[in-house]
Image (tube, grey):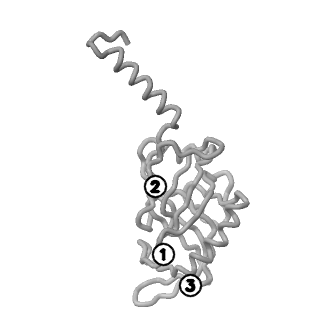
Amino acid sequence: MKQVLVETINFSPVRALTESRSDRGNPVVEGILATVETINENGRFYKKSIWEREVDKYKQLIAEKRALGELDHPDSMNINLKNVCHNITDLWWDGKNIMGKLEILPTPSGQIVKNLIDNGITLGVSSRGTGTLQQRDGVNEVQDDFELLCWDFVSTPSNPGSFVQPIRESKQLNIKSNIHNTISELLCMHGQCEI
């Protein structure tokens, strides 16, 4: 019988999130969503072929702008729109890692995610799907009937390497700050500063 399978990882962006914004100006984070052919913190093992199939299917949701995820895992296999906080805009492979780009949406839950990240809180990203397990040599192998539903933001991950880092201010704000600092330095060069 199929059961809900939840796999959580600390989401660490692959590059600094200084000016990463979507076309709509929403913050974007990028990093590891899942690692395959590794025993995760839940004691589960996923073959790469299972994730390859599911990533290919998920790319259709991305194309349709329906690759939504929630803040925290609900107890169901439905995506509850009132809890949606992000939309995945891209998925790709990097060795054994499934990489993703997530646009943080300006929803109530998205604002919570953004505020937590802005305040230095480390979040995890967790896959949610259904499938069966078969135990072999003390390891729970996920079977070919696995179906991915989504990735959600959570507090505690089970997959290594999936933490989100703070989102910085936009490039325009950083430029204004740098200009202000430069002007202040020039005006205050000789020890006389009226600013």
Residue that mark 1 sits on: 36
* Res 59 seen here: yes
Q: Earlier in the sequence, mark 3 or mark 1?
A: 1
* Residue at x 70% of width, y 57% of height: 65
Could you tell me if the residues under marks 2 and 3 are in contact, i.e. CB atoms within 8 Å?
Answer: no
On the image, the x and y values in percent for residue 137 come to 40, 90
Give the secondary structure at mark 3.
Answer: loop
Q: Residues within 10 Å of mark 2 (few under 14, many from 20)?
A: many
- Between 173 and 104, the one lying in front of the other is 173
Which amino acid lies under the numbered mark 1 shown in the image of this protein?
Answer: Val
Work out how far the residue at label 3 is from the one at label 1, CA to CA, in angstroms: 13 Å
Residue that mark 3 sits on: 143
Q: Mark 2 against mark 3, which lies toward the viewer?
A: 2
Q: Mark 3 against mark 1, which lies toward the viewer?
A: 1
Whether 66 is drawn above or below 114: the answer is below
Picture quarter with the N terminus:
bottom right
On the image, the x and y values in percent for residue 11 come to 46, 58
Residue that mark 2 sits on: 13
Work out how far the residue at label 2 is from the one at label 3, CA to CA, in angstroms: 29 Å
Whether 3 is drawn above or below 88: the answer is below
